[in-house]
Amino acid sequence: MTWNELLARVEAAWPQVGWMDVLPALLAGALTIVIIKVGLRVLVKRLRKLSARTHTTVDDGLVNVLERTNSGLIWIVGLLVGLNMLPLDDRWHGRVSQLWFAVVALQIGLWAQQAVAQVLASHQLRHGGSPALSASATLLSWGLRGALWVIVVLAVLSNLGVNITAFIASLGIGGIALALAVQNILGDLFASLAIAVDKPFEVGDSITVGEVTGTVERVGLKTTRIRSLGGEQIVMSNAELLKRTVSNFKRLQARRVVFNFGITYDATADEVAAVPPLIRELIESDPQLEFLRAHFKGFGESSLDFEVVYRVRDANFDVYMDRRQAFNLALMRALQQRGLQFAFPTRTLNIVGMDALAPRGRADAQAPAPVPAPG
């Protein structure tokens, strides 16, 4: 095809437009571009000053979203405004309308993408930028951005007259097949997202999961790494971890202690009655302990049993053991000063004398025979 033939086809497809029509269209397009750019600059400047005087992050996010406005799309908007002013036939006006929809959809997609990134970044900043949240935020960001741009593309294609029904059905079937193929991986990924959002534990927390006790070192997209008390690193699947009961010791505010002890039966009733007040006095003398109750519980097989309940106000395990040890020693000294002894399992065996147990017939048989009298 020669250049002249190409120009002839363009002239045949393009309606007859004179220079008197083109000049106002160019001016209108240029004026539109200037108004949009200047208006955006003034609006962003004022919003930025307003956000500096407020403590909320909503206005800061709005400023960042508006700054995401694409300059190329602004130029295309100016071009479309100019084309609308030209004396075009209905076919060309229809194409311009389709371009309007595509430009607006693309710009809304860019704004929405920036808003998603802004919300996730703000959420991560409020929670100290933990690695678990960072990984989950990345996963969530990918998912939301992918869904966003799929919707934008489908909307533009539908506006252009493309039948997207079969395409949507294909996406659905392909998505189901992909989900079935990687269901285990997806389960761990969504479990990681659940850990980041629900926060049953965070990096640095001391937890117990089943038979595993240790400190959380890292929460990844698929696995969680725990440093056990023995020193080895234990790697657990996120999905399997959430199926079990998790005990988080870092969130303890106090530790409750319940224990029993017994004293010997040679103690009198008055001595037994004096033990609960004594225990209360010992507990209340320690500022890190909180007395709950102490009672003479009952009569054991070899002891008079007591039950004591108190609370250690510090959740630190070392402090908990130190205060418990101090109380136990103080209790031992106090009971020793009062002449009371801790009981232990005992049995009393009464043995009857062997003479009483000997058979009567055997005793008679062993008696000496009578001596006969002399003649």
Image (cartoon, grey):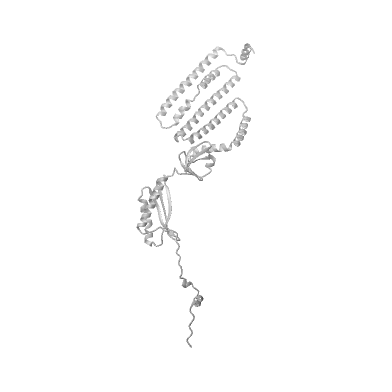
Image coordinates of residue 171 in percent, x first then y, are 61, 32
Give the vertical position of 27 relative to 333 (above or below): above
Image label count: 0
Q: Viewer-proximal residue, 69 or 326? A: 326
Q: Does residue 19 show up? A: yes
Residue drawn 48% across the image and 27% down it: 65
**Among all residues in the image, which is located at the extreme bottom?**
375
Residue lying at 47% horizontally and 21% vertically, measured from the top left: 37
* Residue 342 sits in quarter: bottom left
Q: Where is residue 325 in the image (x, y as percent from the top left)?
A: 39, 50
Residue beneath the point at 45% across and 31% down? 58
Quarter the N terminus occupies: top right
Q: Where residue 308 sits: x, y (%)?
A: 41, 54
Q: Which of these two is toward me, 78 or 287?
A: 287
Residue 332, image x and y in percent? 38, 55
In the picture provided, is 181 more to the left or to the right than 140? right
Whether 171 is drawn above or below 206: the answer is above
State whether residue 279 appears in this view.
no
Residue 260 lies in quadrant: bottom left
Question: Which residue appears farthest toward the front when viewing the image?
Answer: 375
